Amino acid sequence: MTDQQQDARRLPSWARAVLVVALLYLFLVGVKMLEGGIKGLGAEYTDAVFAAVSSPIAGLLAGILATVLVQSSSVSTSTIVGLVASGVVSVETAIPMIMGANIGTTVTNTLVALTHVRRSAEFSRSFAAATMHDFFNFFAVAVFLPLELATGFLSRSATALAELLGGSASGGTFDSPIKAAVKWGAGLVEEVPALITDHPVAFPILVAITGIGLIFVALSSITRNMRLLVVERIERSLNEALARSGVVGMVVGALVTISVQSSSITTSILIPLCAAGVLALRNAYPITLGANVGTTITALIAAVGAGSVDALTIAITHTLFNLAGILLIYPIPRFRYLPVRAAEALTSVAQERKWLAFAYVVGAFFGLPVLGIILF
Amino acid sequence: MVLAFFRSSDHTPIEEVEAILVGMLQNAAIVYDTATEAVFGAGKSKEARKKVRRTDKQIDRGQEEVRQKLMVHGAVRGPDTYLPIVLAYMSVVKDVERVGDYAKNLYDLARYGADLTEGPDADVLAEHRELVGDFIAEASEIFESSDIDAAQAFCERVDEFTSVCDAAVREAHASQGAASDAVARALFYRFMKRIAAHLLNLVSSMILPIDQLDYYDEPAEDRS
């Protein structure tokens, strides 16, 4: 029996559920500390740092790279929400970063697919299943980033929704019992860095780093505990979704991702199923799209904790962007399987020359973002 | 479908797999009963053929479902998967499916015109027919109840029966009677032995280490 199974036996479900709530609180405290730490640095420091991502392309590539490095779009989007809440990064600047995070998160299942490289048929199915997620996000960004830059349709829709939900104008804040509780907790944890230094620059940096650390630890613990809590439900719903496509798959993908707070977990579960041929590529596709939407819940939770209308705006933008991507591509039969067909085309090339699969991963997720950030 | 996520269940996914295996055995019993009825006097009929084919297809679907569920189980649980049970069930589902296949083959004897109610050995054949029918039902009960002692006793009895089948095939080969009777008896005992052996594999999976599955039906000197 593994340690996790022993863990699962030791802790009753109700206690694990309480633990998850506590971890969620810790996560929100982390976002608040990140926001506070960045704010504390002052404009003279932050302006120079964030000028680097003021170009949309640089922002997009930074979003990809940051997500690839932390292997979690939940962490990167929550960090972006914290930055927007601090006022250092504007909603407009953050939108390409959020889109980049969407692309970056797909690296995990692509890496999982590469583990099948020695078995040709399995590799073909798994690599196509992984890269169709990449292509969906590439297409969505290719369409919506220029459109957003030209019209601001995503940010304007999100702002209207955020103002409606937050009850305050853009740039303002909204109060909630959660926000008050989070502020209290953040104040308490900030006492720790305060014991180490009171230097005007070192202290806020330490607070921000502690915040990011809390976000990372809390989210990974939430994922692990939620997975143990809902593992049977995930198994049951995936069993039911195997032979179905369309909306059912999307809802299952979204539900599983919301429950484990990680689209990488959902999509990485699909890879071995596709590799084994148990799940058809076209049935895995809607589950993947659902996971894309489900993962936006983390940023929404972070925004509610931050209590800033702008933070809520960027979180809603993330959700709208993914929903808009589905609405653009999925309903029209001619476009529906474009990402799948692109993935199949890439796979047929990569199957002949396996090194191309590795080159694709390194190039698309590491090389291009680094090069782009340097150039832009 | 989507509601499956919210629905709580009294059974774990592995228990659901076990229920499918038991259902497959029950279907195998239907195929066996229908096929042996045909070969023991009732003869071939359109209804019986349809019933055998339809039920055998259900068994095949059960096998697919078990394999899918085990694959999903492994994919969802990752390193937390309890691998021995997944490997054992992946192996025994094939045995249960084969029970259905060999029962279906028994029906083919009726299609060829064999009638095992004729001849001096009719009583023995009928007794063995009933015994294997009981084995199928018993295997299902033992598997469902996870009764280790009963499993051990079952394996010993079925092991003995496979020797009886071997002897009967040798006897059919040496017989001086009509070739059609000898062939029918040889095939009948061959199929009965295979059914018993696959039941043996299923039930012995409850007591044997994973690396020794599938060898119980071999002659004692060839095992392990």
Image (tube, coloured by chain):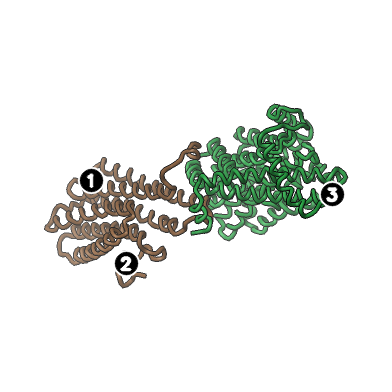
How far is disc 1 from disc 3 in space, using C-alphas? 94 Å
Residue named by callout 1 = B44
Residue B114 is marked as: none
Callout 3 environment at 10 Å: few (<14), some (14 to 19), or many (20+)? few
Where residue A295 sits: x, y (%)?
Answer: 63, 42
Going 64% across and 58% down the picture, which residue do you hit? A354
Going 64% across and 43% down the picture, which residue do you hit? A25
Horizontal side of B150 relative to A273 (left or right) equals left
Q: Secondary structure at mark 3?
A: loop
Q: Residue furthest left?
A: B120
Q: Nearer the viewer, residue A222 or A256?
A: A222
Quarter the C terminus of chain B occupies = bottom left
- Asked if the residue under mark 2 is in contact with the one under mark 3, i.e. CB atoms within 8 Å, the reply is no
What's under tag 2, amino acid-wise?
A: Glu
Q: Chain of mark 2?
A: B
Instruction: Specify the chain shown as brown.
Output: B
Q: Nearer the viewer, residue B104 or A330?
A: A330
Instruction: Specify the chain shown as green.
Output: A
Q: Earlier in the sequence, mark 1 or mark 2?
A: 1
What's under tag 1, amino acid-wise?
A: Lys
**Circles 1 and 3 on the same subunit:** no
Where residue B15 sits: x, y (%)?
Answer: 40, 49
One can see residue B71 in this view? yes
Residue named by callout 3 = A200
Residue named by callout 2 = B218
**Circles 1 and 2 on the same subunit:** yes
